[in-house]
Image (spheres, coloured by chain):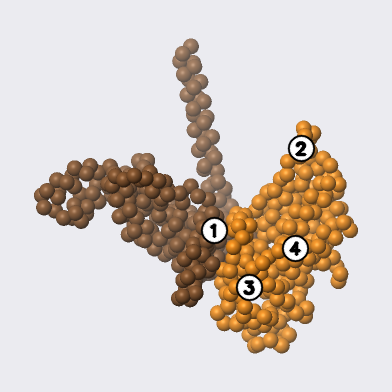
């Protein structure tokens, strides 16, 4: 078991991690704080580096957690300049509170089943999630990934092509509702759970030797619409918003398994 | 002059005490204010989620305490009486979970008892027994972080009882067990009660290790702290989290008051 996995799990469990990079030299640097959904962890890490490289003097401080946690923190006055959520709901909640200066579509994501190589052998197709006794973990309903996963199950039920009561059977296999999609994935990587429903992007970037991706049919997919919002009027924050929705950013996001916003790739 | 300087020092001291008190009282005032202000708070307190979580929290933390007492008392007595090389190391090891961040405790428990863990793997492949995502895992996490508080206090309590008393009882024909029950236990009782209270309170508040090792499922592994975390993330945001926090706070206060009544010496530092 990779030490990195354990470390990642420890970081995930703490809920959020602020990642600040110190600039060299004595010159004053401006810092902007970006709250980003847990599923954006790798993509935004790279995005922030690219942004800092093209915007000397600006330092990006990243805080990752489930979109819902970030929303509540921002609502309660956590200082933040940019908020990137895995669903429009959280951004709308901030907009209703008058905190959003500007918002844009960021990217789209689809769902996939992450099956453990060891223990998850029974999972060959999406339909196998209903197998009795399977140890399934989902992101909690309170975070976007959890809602999307349950929506996919509901769509499968409506389609009626799978077993009757498919969604109910799958939900009966749920052993834990994890606080973020990355926490759910970590449980599969550790072999604690047999399978989880995660974002396609979660399995796209880094090598995850303990995990196998099992596709979810497109007709059951409700694409996840990522939204990015400007929470302050600072010029550097506005520059980050522009950068995150630029072509350069789209390439980084695509590399991490995200689809462009508002349409097929 | 000197009285003026004395008064200034006194004022400075009072200011420090006031700042300290303010810092620790304000968060409770905030909880109370939010809870009373929000009309939806009562719904959250009476929800099925809250009921399940509170029931689970109460019985798992009580079971963890019972196990801590049964297995920890002999350890504490042994540490209080025995003289051997490396005793300090043993004591430090037992204290380790107290200073360990709970997330590390959770990861450590996984490496030992998880499906790929040192003991977890043979348990799974030989007996098909898995501990993760079970209520057993919840109790294990609580025991791991809570028991050291009990052992620590009990060891201090036993050590404060002069071994001479026991020796006298033995020469008068009492058995070792009888001497322990009739002499050592009554004399160290306040320390034991204080340690038990701390152990139980720590088990009740356990979050990080439980989340990592046991997961989060209503009625099964979702204790009050996990329910509060989930509520914090829900659409109702702080309202439900505040309501559940107040509920747990009241339960903990009632329980600690009960411990306090049992043991007057809990008022003294350990």
Res. A24 mark: 2
Q: Are marks 4 and 1 in contact (CB under 8 Å)?
A: no
Q: Secondary structure at mark 2?
A: loop
| Residue ID for mark 1 | B107
Q: Which residue is rendered at x = 45% and y = 49% of the image?
A: B96
Q: CA distance from mark 2 to mark 1?
A: 35 Å
Residue B90 at x, y percent in the picture = 38, 48
Q: Marks 3 and 1: CB-CB under 8 Å?
A: no
Q: Comparing marks 3 and 4, which lies closer to the viewer?
A: 3
Q: Tell me which chain appears brown.
A: B
Q: CA distance from mark 4 to mark 1?
A: 24 Å
> Of residues A83 and A221, which is closer to you in this image?
A221
For the residues tagged 3 and 2, is the chain the same? yes
The residue under label 4 is A205
Please determine if labels 3 and 4 lie on a single subunit.
Answer: yes
Real-space Cα distance between discs 3 and 4? 18 Å
Residue A163: x percent and y percent?
65, 87
Secondary structure, mark 1, is: helix
Q: Decide: marks 2, 1 in contact (CB < 8 A)?
A: no
Residue B236 seen anywhere in this rendered image of the structure: no
For mark 3, what is the residue?
A: A117
Q: Nearer the viewer, residue B179 or A4?
A: A4
Q: Is residue B16 above or below residue B91?
A: above
Q: Which chain is orange?
A: A
**Badge nearest the viewer, 3 or 2:** 3
- Mark 3–mark 1 Cα distance, whole angstroms, equals 21 Å
Residue at the right extreme of this rendering: A247
Say whether residue B187 is left or right of residue A56.
Answer: left
């Amino acid at each position: 078991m990779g030490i990195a996995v354990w470390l990642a799990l420890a970081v995930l469990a703490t809920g959020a991690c602020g990642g600040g990079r110190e600039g060299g030299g004595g010159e004053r640097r401006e810092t902007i704080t970006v709250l980003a959904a847990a599923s954006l962890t790798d993509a935004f890490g790279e995005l922030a580096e690219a942004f800092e490289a093209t915007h000397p003097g600006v330092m990006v401080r990243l805080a990752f957690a489930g979109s819902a946690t970030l929303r509540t923190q921002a609502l309660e006055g956590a200082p933040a300049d940019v908020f990137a959520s895995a669903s429009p709901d959280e951004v709308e909640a901030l907009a209703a509170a008058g905190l959003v200066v500007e918002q844009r579509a960021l990217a789209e994501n689809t769902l996939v089943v992450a099956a453990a190589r060891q223990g998850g052998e029974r999972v060959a197709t999406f339909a196998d999630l209903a197998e009795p006794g399977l140890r399934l973990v989902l992101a909690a309903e309170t975070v976007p990934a959890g809602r999307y996963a349950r929506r996919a199950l509901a769509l499968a039920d409506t389609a009626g092509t799978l077993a009757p009561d498919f969604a109910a059977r799958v939900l009966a296999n749920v052993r834990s509702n994890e606080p973020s999609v990355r926490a759910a994935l970590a449980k599969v990587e550790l072999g604690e759970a047999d399978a989880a429903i995660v974002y396609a992007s979660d399995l796209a970037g880094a090598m995850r030797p303990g995990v196998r991706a099992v596709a979810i049919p497109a007709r059951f997919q409700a694409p996840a619409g990522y939204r990015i919002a400007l929470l302050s009027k600072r010029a550097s924050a506005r520059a980050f918003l522009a950068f995150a929705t630029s072509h350069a950013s789209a390439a980084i996001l695509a590399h991490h398994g995200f689809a462009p916003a508002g349409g097929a790739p | 002059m000197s009285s003026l300087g004395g008064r200034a020092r006194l004022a400075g001291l009072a200011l420090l005490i006031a700042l300290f008190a303010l810092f620790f009282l304000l968060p409770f005032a905030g909880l109370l204010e939010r809870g009373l202000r929000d009309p939806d708070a009562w719904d959250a307190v009476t929800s099925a989620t809250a009921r399940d979580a509170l029931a689970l929290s109460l019985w798992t933390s009580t079971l963890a305490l019972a196990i801590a007492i049964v297995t920890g008392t002999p350890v504490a007595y042994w540490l209080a009486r025995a003289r051997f090389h490396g005793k300090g190391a043993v004591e430090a090891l037992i204290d380790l979970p107290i200073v360990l961040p709970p997330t590390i405790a959770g990861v450590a428990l996984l490496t030992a008892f998880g499906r790929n863990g040192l003991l977890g793997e043979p348990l799974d492949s030989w007996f098909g027994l898995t501990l993760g995502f079970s209520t057993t895992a919840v109790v294990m996490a609580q025991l791991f972080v809570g028991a050291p508080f009990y052992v620590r206090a009990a060891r201090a309590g036993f050590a404060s009882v002069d071994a001479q008393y026991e020796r006298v009882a033995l020469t008068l024909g009492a058995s070792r067990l009888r001497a322990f029950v009739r002499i050592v236990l009554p004399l160290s009782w306040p320390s034991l009660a204080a340690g038990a209270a701390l152990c139980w309170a720590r088990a009740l508040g356990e979050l990080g290790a439980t989340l990592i090792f046991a997961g989060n499922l209503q009625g099964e592994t979702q204790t009050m702290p996990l329910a509060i975390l989930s509520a914090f993330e829900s659409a109702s945001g702080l309202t439900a989290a505040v309501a559940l926090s107040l509920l747990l706070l009241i339960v903990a206060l009632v329980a600690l008051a009960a411990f306090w009544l049992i043991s007057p010496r809990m008022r003294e530092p350990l």
